[in-house]
Amino acid sequence: MSSEFSGDVMDVLGQLFEAGAAALDDGDPDTARQCLTSAETVATNKLPDSEFRSRLLHGCDRALATVDGDGERPGPNPGAGAGDRPTERTGDDSHVAAEHCRVMARQVDARR
């Protein structure tokens, strides 16, 4: 394991990415979203600024965008009502988001 990355942090990230993939496989986008946002927070707060951290954050962003079903993360939209923000999977791209999670889990495993 690289001394640059804490074993506990890497364990948590691996578990979150695996849980996100499993949730998507089970058709549970809300749990997957929670796992991904938690992983994003852990990576931001616990990993040093590095290419690895940037790759994980990019992967979280792409997976969350896919979970949200619009290819972009929802942001403030002054003209939109609360019902205009996607909160559930409406397409069949959950397998794409699950694969994003698995790729990130493999990247974490490779750094242990």
Image (tube, rainbow, N blue to C red):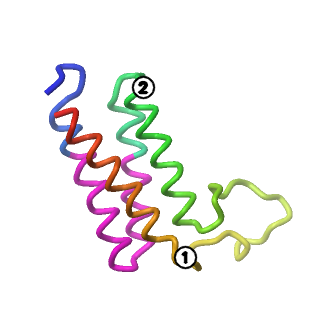
Task: Give the residue type that dot 1 points to.
Answer: Glu
Residue 88, numbered circle: 1
Is 16 inside the magenta-drawn segment?
yes
The secondary structure type at the circle numbered 2 is helix
Q: Nearer the viewer, mark 1 or mark 2?
A: 2
Residue 100, numbered circle: none
**x and y percent of residue 19 in the render?**
28, 62
Residue 43, placed above or below residue 39 = above
Q: CA distance from mark 1 to mark 2?
A: 31 Å
Q: Report the quarter where the C terminus lies.
A: top left
Residue at the spot 26% in from the left edge and 40% down from the top edge? 108
The quarter of the picture where residue 6 lies is top left
Residue bearing the label numbered 2: 51
Q: Nearer the viewer, residue 55 or 11?
A: 55
Range of magenta residues:
12-39
Mark 1–mark 2 CB contact (< 8 Å): no
**x and y percent of residue 56 in the render?**
41, 40
Residue 92, placed above or below residue 100 = below
Task: Give the residue type that dot 2 points to.
Answer: Glu
Residue at the spot 55% in from the left edge and 76% down from the top edge? 88
The secondary structure type at the circle numbered 1 is loop
**x and y percent of residue 85 in the render?**
68, 69
Q: Report the quarter where the N terminus lies.
A: top left
Does 57 sit left or right of 13 as displayed? right
Q: Nearer the viewer, residue 70 or 83?
A: 70
Does 16 sit left or right of 86 as displayed? left
Residue at the spot 39% in from the left edge and 65% down from the top edge? 32
